[in-house]
């Protein structure tokens, strides 16, 4: 996770490779060789890209999509909405999001240590599935005494089962639904709330 000034993805994970393009999508010079549907690892941006000729792609492959020489992607076509993902890409998305969450444990543990209220009546911790008011107050009390160090530490000290899985669920909600508050993603192509 690289949450600094940049707003673009450096790396993304392949969700699906459509060798003949996406059904119903307009054909352009960039889509004539097929389309790769991906999710970025920094902002969980849903992307489509045109592949390099003779390159091979498998779901969950991590590829460079940032600025500079892209060995496996010839062109970033742009962002896509969750509804534009293929069924295969939608099926692959939960596993890939969990891979990213677990690979960036320090970033997500820091969320538990530093999260703030989003309104006077709601804390951002409450947006995580499985965390209600009682558990939120417990987390705030425990982190005030000593910061959390890992998912396992959160699980043991708060008795919160599978924090990485709950964070994954939240990311998936932000990607697939119209959520008013975005904790881990950028507004999608179909997101209507101002952020």
Image (spheres, grey):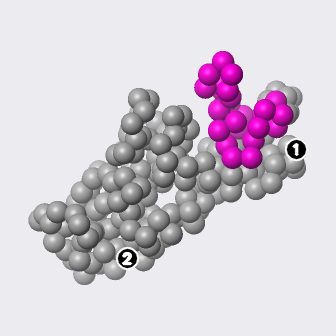
In front here: 70 or 89?
89
Q: Classify residue 76 as left or right of residue 126.
A: left
Q: Classify residue 74 as left or right of residue 110.
A: left
Disc number for residue 157: 1
- Look at the image and tell me in which quarter the C terminus lies: top left
Q: Classify residue 146 as left or right of residue 106.
A: right
Which residue bears the numbered disc 2? 57
Q: Residue at x 27, y 78 (%)?
A: 19
Q: Residue at x 23, y 66 (%)?
A: 24
Q: Secondary structure at mark 1?
A: helix
Q: Secondary structure at mark 2?
A: loop
Task: Choose the circle earlier in sequence order: 2 or 1.
Answer: 2
Q: Percent from the top left, x then y, of residue 43?
A: 46, 46
- The boundaries of the magenta stretch are 111-137
Q: Residue furthest top?
A: 120
In front here: 127 or 116?
127
Q: Residue at x 62, y 44 (%)?
A: 107
Q: Percent from the top left, x then y, of residue 20?
A: 23, 77
Distance from label 2 to label 1 (Cα)? 41 Å
């Amino acid at each position: 996770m690289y949450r600094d000034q940049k707003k673009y993805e450096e790396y993304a994970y392949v969700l699906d490779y459509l060798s003949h393009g996406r059904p119903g999508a307009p054909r352009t010079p960039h889509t004539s060789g097929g389309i790769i549907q991906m999710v970025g690892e920094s902002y969980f941006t849903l992307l489509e890209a045109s592949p390099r000729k003779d390159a091979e792609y498998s779901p969950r492959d991590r590829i460079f999509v940032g600025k500079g020489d892209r060995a496996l992607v010839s062109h970033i076509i742009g962002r896509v909405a969750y509804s534009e993902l293929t069924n295969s890409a939608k099926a692959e998305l939960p596993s890939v999001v969990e891979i990213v969450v677990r690979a960036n444990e320090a970033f997500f543990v820091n969320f538990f240590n530093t999260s703030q209220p989003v309104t006077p009546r709601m804390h951002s911790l409450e947006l995580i599935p499985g965390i209600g008011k009682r558990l939120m107050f417990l987390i705030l009390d425990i982190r005030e005494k000593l910061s959390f160090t890992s998912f396992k530490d959160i699980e043991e000290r708060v008795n919160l089962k599978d924090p990485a899985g709950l964070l994954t669920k939240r990311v998936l909600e932000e990607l697939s639904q119209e959520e008013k508050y975005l904790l881990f993603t950028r507004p999608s192509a179909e997101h209507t709330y101002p952020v």
